[in-house]
Image (cartoon, rainbow, N blue to C red):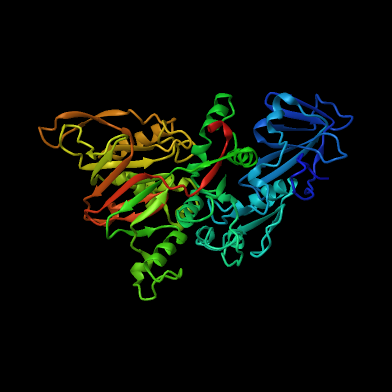
Amino acid sequence: MAAQVPRTAADSQPALGTAPYDHAHHVKYQDGELVWAAQGGDIEQPQGRVKRDDIVVVLKAPEGTPGYLIYSLAEAPEGEQPFKLSVLLAPQLLEEPLAEFLLADMPAHLAVQASHLLHVIVSTRSGTGQATAFFDHVLRPLLAALGLEAHTEPDHPAVPGSYRVSATQSPRTVRDFARSLGAVGTSGATSVSGNGKGSNVPAALTIVLLSGDGGVIDLLNGVGSSSSAAPPTVALLPLGTGNALFHSLHKPLYSAAEVAGASGQSPLVLGLRTLLRGASAPLPTFRASFSPGSRLVAAPEGIKAAVVAEDGDGDGDGDAHASDDEHDHPPIDHLVGAIVASYGFHASLVWASDTTAYRAHGAKRFGMAAAELLKEAHAYAATVAVRRPGSTEEELLLAPDSLNKPRKEFTYVLATLVSSLERAFTISPASRPLDGQLRLVHFGAVDGERTMDVMRAAYRGGEHVGMRWTTQTQSDGGKEIEDGVGYDAVDEVRVTVQEPDPRWRKVCIDGTIVELEDGGWMAVARSAEQRLRVLVDPSVL
């Protein structure tokens, strides 16, 4: 039997997909759960139950079948089948707990038409590699219930009710897809390879991205700013390691849930709810520029291939005469980001943890790599200048014992457009979804124990902001002075490194690592270009 979304006469979606479901003849809501019994059963001894936090959507049952279909997601990441989409047929809608989940109309961003296309990208290697299972067991049947049918053929025509699904075949897949947008016709917008021969660029495109932050960054740096098509709208389903952008966009929803005692709310449930009921908004971005001589040393292959191609013959294969070092570590003058640009401990941590052995541990890899870095407690030699909102002048961050002497050593320098680097790691508590304000977190040279204290405080809702401590000067007989974590709203930040050892000259832009030369610099400023739009819960707008 098919789940049905009521449609207008103008809606041209085809017949709806099928979905097996359980029957419930008695349903009630108690203690944050739906409980039910089968026909003739005793509701006081329920046959089944589902938490309200696990409910994804409610659809009107198909014509001829009274009642409503309630879709919920169960997760068991360590099991053989990590995800299960369950469907319950209830005879009536319990208004109080369920009305907000009722999907009365097909969302415009999912309604496939000649002028609007839908593309699902499954990043097979993101996080711990669960994106394929999520698509097969959750997203595909959920979209089928809305009358949307998947196809994988690059040249399949864009017809109502048909969306293109692509699994990544290499680290370049997402970026190659992004480059095709606006460069070729409609076929290019629905083909990862970009080999289509269509002649009309679609007016709109929605990309459902089963990935982590890396997929978003590949799209940002691939789509460019000169495309003739409207910026694509991206729907994020968080299947990466940190998922910083997703968690930051949904932080107000987590906060509300935690106040209500539902701290275990699933990011994937929230992602599906946003997919079905979200609103599209411009995604704020920044531009990170680098001094001459800077090189990529660790980056998604799609970004690296793009840099090689732009510096070479432009055909995507790079310069055939370029040296191995130029291919492996190509020169770079800028990157576009949406999350974070850093120097110091954070950048070193991302670089050190990005190995096959560490990645097998998922988010735990950061803690493992951090333990080694904290033992060294390196003092990063650099100066940092900022341009504050409304100002045209740069000012240097000063040493705590001087009103005119710049600070020359740092442990942490991080500029960000988002609040959270992980769900529980609040690096910028003043940041709000889509506010577009660049904020800088920084502190001077400290030992590993102090650095760890700051990081633990960030895991407590951003309590690191305002932390103060006393330290001793290297002169004046070891005079004690006050120091602490700096936190500033900025329009631009410039970091100039003074490190002879290349190990300590790494900067991080949304997971991509760039090595500066000794005396080189990174400048980060908010970008006015609109490259992508993103689906968010309407409550954050």
Count of numbered badges drawn on the protein: 0
Within the image, what quadrant is residue 10 found in?
A: top right
In the picture as drawn, the residue positioned furthest to the left comes out as 476
Within the image, what quadrant is residue 177 found in?
A: bottom right
Which residue is painted at 64% across and 49% down in the image?
134
Please state which of residues 149 and 470 is positioned toward the viewer in this rendering. 149
In the picture as drawn, the residue positioned furthest to the right comes out as 40
Which residue is painted at 50% across and 50% down in the image?
216
Q: Quadrant of the N terminus?
A: top right
Res 177 seen here? no
Rendering coords of residue 467 (x, y %): 32, 28
Location of residue 323 with respect to 249 vertically, above or below: below
On the rendered structure, is 233 left or right of 471? right
Rendering coords of residue 18 (x, y %): 79, 48
Please state which of residues 159 and 324 is positioned toward the viewer in this rendering. 159
Which residue is painted at 45% across and 38% down in the image?
420
Which residue is painted at 40% across and 34% down in the image?
428
Res 498 seen here? yes
Rendering coords of residue 114 (x, y %): 67, 54
On the rendered structure, is 26 left or right of 332? right
Please state which of residues 529 and 493 is positioned toward the viewer in this rendering. 529
Location of residue 179 with respect to 103 vertically, above or below: below
On the rendered structure, is 34 left or right of 37? left
In the picture as drawn, the residue positioned furthest to the bottom comes out as 321
Rendering coords of residue 417 (x, y %): 41, 40
